[in-house]
Amino acid sequence: MKLNQLLLVSFAGLQFILPALAADETATNSTGAAQAEIPAYTAGGGTAQSGEAAEIEALKKELRELGQQVQTLQQQRDLDQQTNAATATGQIQDLDQKVRILGRQRELDQEAAVAAAKAAPKLTVGSSGFTAMSADSNFVFSLKGVLQVDSRTFFNDTAIKNNDGFLLRRARPIFQGTVDRDFDFRFTPDFGGSTVQIFDAYGNYRYQPWAQLRVGKFKTPEGLEQLQEDVNTSFNERSLVTDLVPNRDVGIQLWGDIHGGVLSYAAGIFNGVGDAQNSANAAVENEVEFAGRLFVQPFKNSDLAPLQGLGLGVAGTSQNGTSNPRDLPSTTGGTLPGYATDGQQQFFAYNPSNGVVAASGEHWRLSPQAYYYYGPLSLLGEYAISDQEVRSTFNGARADLHNTAWEISGGWVLTGEKASFAGITPLHPFDPHNGQWGALQVVGRYAELDIDNSAFPVFADPVRSASAAQAWSAGLNWYLNKNLRINASFSHTTFTGGGGAGTVAPAIVTRQPENVFFTRVQLSF
Amino acid sequence: MKTFFKILLVGALAVAADAREIKLLNVSYDPTRELYQDYNAAFAKYWQAKTGNNVVVAQSHGGSGKQAQSVINGLEADVVTLALAYDIDAIARQAQLLPADWQKRLPHNSTPYTSTIVFLVRKGNPKHIKDWDDVVRTNVVVVTPNPKTSGGARWNYLAAWAYALDKYGHDDAKARDFVKQLFKNVPVLDSGARGSTTTFAERGIGDVLLAWENEAYLASKQFGADKFDIVTPSLSILAEPPVAVVDKMAKKHGTTDVAQAYVEYLYSDEGQDIAGRNFYRPRDAKVAAKYASQFSPVKLVTVDEVFGGWQKAQKTHFADNGVFDQIFQP
């Protein structure tokens, strides 16, 4: 019998027994007097009373037993309830612990996953090219590139047959990176010209930002416009000033940026190359060239916003070479060393009537330079001296030729972006679906190059070579996004001297002003 | 022109040679955050008064084994203050960043303070945990870090093993079963001692935390003495966390002198007092006496006595496929 049922029966039983007992008591007490023990024997009724008393005793006994059973059952019920509660509490606590443990295990797993992600190498692809980097960033490899497709259209130069057209101006994959945190490298071949050339191939040790050592082939620290990255120049071609400064050379250079670039310095020893020359990757003589540059941006870290973009500097080179044609200027646009226009046509050559010219003796350069950037405004100016001792192989005549050039260029970003030496990034990249057109910049430049009169006639033919050139240029640059740019510009160059008979440069070039319209589509990443 | 370039070079270097703040990196084990926060401030003040130079000490904390591996992998620590000598030996052996006899360079085997392993239990000790035997009961949940990454966990493990050896008459098989049962009671393995404290004290997991003595006292202080009780077992292990200058890195950074002074200052009166205040047992007898009352007496055994040294203990128990890998199944 179940506990509840037993209790019900017991209570039910008590329902009957207790009233009976009360009635008995009531009957017994109905006379109102204290009841005395009635003797068992009365006339004829003693046996019936004793029978009832026995029955009552038995019922009382049964009742007591039932009461005890009820009490026991109650106690048992209470005990069971306590046990169940304790069991339930224990189960809840166990479950609580399990939940906490699972939660903590999940936390630890997440921490481990974050740590593993931190240790994993990173691969990024974006506007800055393709980059793979170790988790600690001590090892980096980047693949970048430059592709420049130009067009040149010359006007009023019917005598010159092969200068109009499209050309692959630069096609350079750039491999650069870092090993062991402090050692950088860069390798840049160029497939754009008629022959493959190596432009950059160097290693750089970064002891501190203010103390770095570079070894290999890289730009000589000289011309300001030359030092600007090819993808960031204002025009398709650099100005006449760049005719007088070296391009890239092989050597070793100590350099650095102090206080975040407030002062930059470079001091190096190189093989030595002629004006505008790109080194042939090996020394051609024993004498080395010393090169150095100081550039200050005194307000770069100041609160004077209008002056933060001001930079001034001076650079120079010095070599005391023996007779070597590689020490003379580049042959760009011609067959002899000389100087070329914006259109890359040679207007001056070391082209004497007799013999050839050799560099012989000291060659030094000096270039004060400056730029200013403020908001959309950009200004750049430099002056260059290339002082070259030369010798005629015909009669041994010598001269110290002091050639000079200068330029001033400026630009204004019509769409309001900030201009900088490191280029322009459109605020609203080209997306015609959303009415965004990139950034637009107008640019202008004036430059002059003057050849020392002592060059004529022993070292250069005044009939064919100009003694000076003056060039002005104007253009429009459209920056579609960080990677794509389209240029259009016009250059007009006039000459002093030259223009005489001849079917090749420089005569054919200096016979009339050079008018050339450039376009460029540039992809860089 | 050549003179011009010489002047250019000298001038540039002269401008560059301005004074710089001295920075040190102290790579430490997990529970020493508070100790070195206090100590670094004191050392900086001392060094400023002595030399006039500012020294800024950066801290890195984590499981001792993990920290050692980080240094081996290139983390440029000027000093290491790890949980056990084996981890610094690993740095010397695998990365040759300091000499193999580094431990002889400072007093007391390069251990300026010691500690031991105790139990942190819930207030009132509801599971009645009095000694190591209680920790292996099936109804007890134990929190301890992973011996593969944590120096503290290795001390915990060896302390339990040492107790079992003492109890079972140096029977390794029984000791192994004892420790195996202990780890059956471990539901979560943090990578370091501080993580285990978080698991026990903040996440409310477990009945007992096997902890560095200093960590137990710190947890009690931080979370409230009304939350936990500290139980000192009948036998525990003398934990000797060593310190060392990482010679090659200090030389590279030009911080050799400062780094050497940094570890030496731990043995000074002030350094020892800071250790005592942070519940480590100072080596200096005078300072140790000052803080003696905050520690309970305990029978201590050493790694050398019981296990033949750290090299042997590491190889036997904690190397890949060692005893721990054999007895612990996650």
Image (spheres, coloured by chain):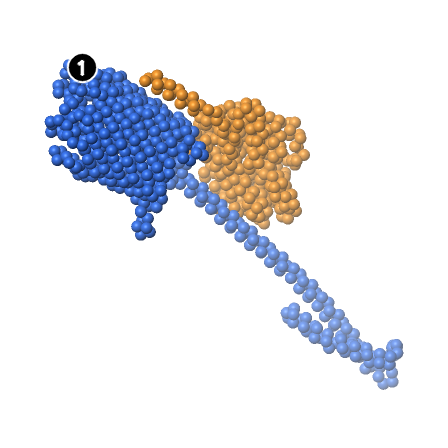
Lateral position of residue A202 relative to residue B276, left or right:
left
Please tell me in which quadrant of the rendered image residue B70 appears.
top left
Q: Residue at x 40, y 35 (%)?
A: A306
Q: Residue at x 84, y 79 (%)?
A: A29
Near-viewer residue (A353 or A85) = A353
Instruction: Quarter of the image for the N terminus of chain A: give it.
Output: bottom right
Instruction: Quarter of the image for the C terminus of chain A: give it.
Output: top left
Lateral position of residue A388 relative to residue A253, left or right:
left
Near-viewer residue (B80 or B311) = B80
In the image, residue B247 above or below residue A65: above
For mark 1, name the chain.
A
- The x, y position of residue B289, in whole percent, is 66, 30
Q: Residue at x 50, y 35 (%)?
A: B60
Q: Does residue A323 show up? A: no
**As shown in the figure, which amino acid type bears the numbered disc 1?**
Ala
- The x, y position of residue A225, in whole percent, is 30, 30
Element at label 1: loop
Lateral position of residue A193 relative to residue A228, left or right:
left
User: Which residue has dot 1 on it?
Assistant: A397
Near-viewer residue (A204 or B108) = A204
Q: Residue at x 69, y 65 (%)?
A: A74
How many circles with numbers are drawn on the protein? 1
Name the colour assigned to chain A in the rendering. Answer: blue
Q: Does residue A20 show up? A: yes
- The x, y position of residue B139, in whole percent, is 58, 49
Q: Residue furthest top?
A: A396
In the image, residue A328 above or below residue A73: above
Near-viewer residue (A134 or B102) = A134
At label 1, counting other C-alpha atoms closer than 10 Å, the crowd grade (few under 14, some 14-19, many 20 or more) is: few
- The x, y position of residue B140, in whole percent, is 58, 48
Name the colour assigned to chain B in the rendering. Answer: orange
Lateral position of residue A419 relative to residue B288, left or right:
left
